[in-house]
Image (cartoon, rainbow, N blue to C red):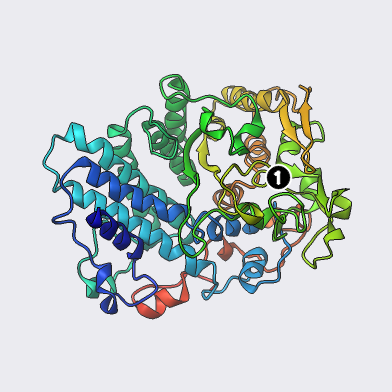
């Protein structure tokens, strides 16, 4: 047991160069020799690698909120400089959010590399160890995919760091080569992972194929994106996938474990670690002064009224995605009066409801440390990946079919509750109506915007489709963001990384 604790401690401390100089922190240098004896040892390293993704510095708050703020769907109520920079496209290389999720990414990659290298020391048949090792390949691809979409070319490390001097001199790998490596990792994962896993937080064959579809879509390789998405759809029964009949279930920590829709998720079920290393999305998006969740939220990332109004009032997804009322000081108030808490950050607009309404049994004050399973990719997105790719390869009628499957679930209604905690049963409606005629790319992007709202996806859609001039112009949902330029499609590399390694170059415009 002591050995396991030592290994996990080292995995937690490993980064590309970390927050400290590796020459002064030799515990960051770890070779796999000695520890890895069985596939269970590989699994230990994989689990440690994925732990970094659920950290507050990664999806627990810093990266997830940064993605929301950079989209055209979420306004900032806070005055913290690092958040203002993300929201207004004035991001500096010294930004305090960058300096959190960049090293966390590389710590996760280091854990995956350790598992992959360690697997070579495990003397059992490939059929026994490769299904576990494949989780490490998937995990490495997951972290690098987010990095390359955020920063373009990045330092690429594919083995445990044993030479601090060499690590300090690494250069940026061009983005196209990073993508090629991501695809290779996912192909290995797809080959060896089982069709299903006991938990959606464990990568499966469906997760690898779904991510391949999304990677190809991001690269503009629409035929391969279609092929991979279609493979998942055609084998949905084998992979135990389906649209959840109730859209609210996807954001209800009490029932999400039983849903067939998540394909790969980050599981926050009763996770607790030092330094607030848990889920804080609910408080960041919650209503200030709300009686719910032991004090409500912090009113940081809040949609403008125009975003709320862009949803049809009869679309069940609006009722699930937005909070229209709350109980504040024992009084039920509508969004026009959310400022009654008296706090400067409280705002008169509907708030995000996806993360605050059903945080589960393990949440603490303000709904921190929820038991949410945060879907990184779910079956509805695979349908929409297939739809977008189908349009691009001349199968627009087929794309319409996929969009309409997503819409049918939305208009089925379901059980939810109001912000004051009153149960509500929303009956089926005619909205959103089926799309008629061949679908267009614009149809798919709009459906993605509504279906996947506030899930950390919209920014990546804006980037890959180069929508900035449109969505951040005067007619955008948030109005004009005059500081936006095409350089903002990429973030700056963190300033401290450049200072430590002069071989790293900065992105244009920073």
Q: Position of residue 51 (x, y in %)?
A: 41, 52
Nearer-the-camera pick, 296 or 322: 296
Residue drawn at (38%, 38%) of the image: 203
Residue 217 makes an appearance in the image: yes
Nearer-the-camera pick, 439 or 297: 297
Which element is circle 1 on?
A: loop
Q: Position of residue 237 (x, y in %)?
A: 45, 19
Q: Position of residue 454 (x, y in %)?
A: 64, 47
Nearer-the-camera pick, 147 or 260: 260
Q: Residues within 10 Å of mark 1 (few under 14, many from 20)?
A: many
Q: Residue furthest left?
A: 123
Q: Which residue is mark 1?
A: 353
Please state if 281 lies on the left or on the right of 290 as rendered: left
Q: Position of residue 464 (x, y in %)?
A: 54, 49
Q: How many marks?
A: 1
Figure quadrant of residue 484:
bottom right
Residue drawn at (63%, 58%) of the image: 70
Residue 470 makes an appearance in the image: no
Vertical comparison of 441 with 281: above or below: above
Residue drawn at (78%, 23%) of the image: 427
Figure quadrant of residue 174:
bottom left
Vertical comparison of 429 with 325: above or below: above
Vertical comparison of 264 with 31: above or below: above
Residue drawn at (76%, 45%) of the image: 323
Please state if 380 lies on the left or on the right of 263 as rendered: right
């Amino acid at each position: 047991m002591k050995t396991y604790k030592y290994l996990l401690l080292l995995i937690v401390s490993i980064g590309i160069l970390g927050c400290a100089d590796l020459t002064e922190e030799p515990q960051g240098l770890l070779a796999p020799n000695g520890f890895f004896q069985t596939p269970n040892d590989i699994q230990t390293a994989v689990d440690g690698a994925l732990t970094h993704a659920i950290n507050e510095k990664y999806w627990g708050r810093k990266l997830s909120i940064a993605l929301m703020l950079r989209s055209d769907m979420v306004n900032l109520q806070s005055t913290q400089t690092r958040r203002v920079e993300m929201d207004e496209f004035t991001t500096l290389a010294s930004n305090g959010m960058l300096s959190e999720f960049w090293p966390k990414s590389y710590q996760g990659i280091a854990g995956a590399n350790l598992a992959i290298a360690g697997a070579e020391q495990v003397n059992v048949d490939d059929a026994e160890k490769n299904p576990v090792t494949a989780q490490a390949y998937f995990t490495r691809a997951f972290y690098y995919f987010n990095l390359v979409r955020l920063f373009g070319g990045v330092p690429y490390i594919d083995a445990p760091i044993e030479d601090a001097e060499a690590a300090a001199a690494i250069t940026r790998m061009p983005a196209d080569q990073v993508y090629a490596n991501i695809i290779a990792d996912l192909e290995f994962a797809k080959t060896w992972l089982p069709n299903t896993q006991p938990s959606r937080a464990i990568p499966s064959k469906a997760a690898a194929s779904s991510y391949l579809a999304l990677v190809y879509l991001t690269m503009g390789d629409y035929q391969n994106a279609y092929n991979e998405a279609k493979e998942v759809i055609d084998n949905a029964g084998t992979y135990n996938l389906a649209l959840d009949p109730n859209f609210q279930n996807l954001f209800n920590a009490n029932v999400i474990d039983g849903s067939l829709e998540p394909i790969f998720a980050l599981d926050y079920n009763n996770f607790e670690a030092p330094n607030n290393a848990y889920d804080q999305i609910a408080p960041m998006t919650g209503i200030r002064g709300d009686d719910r969740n032991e004090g409500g939220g912090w009113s940081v990332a809040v949609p403008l009224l125009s975003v709320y109004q862009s949803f049809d009032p009869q679309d069940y997804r609006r009722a699930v995605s937005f909070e229209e009322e709350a109980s504040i000081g024992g009084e039920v108030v509508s969004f026009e009066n959310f400022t009654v808490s008296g706090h400067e950050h409280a705002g008169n607009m509907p708030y995000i409801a996806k993360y605050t309404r059903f945080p589960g049994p393990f949440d603490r004050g303000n709904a921190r440390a929820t038991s949410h399973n945060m879907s990184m990719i779910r079956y509805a997105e695979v349908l929409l990946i297939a739809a977008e790719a189908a349009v691009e390869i001349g199968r627009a009628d087929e794309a319409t079919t996929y969009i309409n499957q997503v819409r049918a679930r939305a208009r089925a209604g379901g059980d939810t509750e109001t912000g004051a905690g009153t149960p509500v049963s929303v009956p089926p409606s005619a909205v959103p109506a089926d799309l008629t005629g061949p679908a267009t790319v614009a149809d798919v992007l709009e459906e993605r915007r509504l279906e996947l709202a506030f899930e950390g996806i919209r920014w990546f859609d804006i980037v890959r489709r180069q929508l900035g001039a449109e969505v951040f112009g005067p007619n955008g949902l948030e109005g004009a963001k005059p500081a936006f330029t095409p350089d903002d499609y990429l973030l700056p590399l963190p300033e401290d990384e450049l200072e430590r390694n002069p071989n790293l170059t900065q992105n244009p415009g920073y």
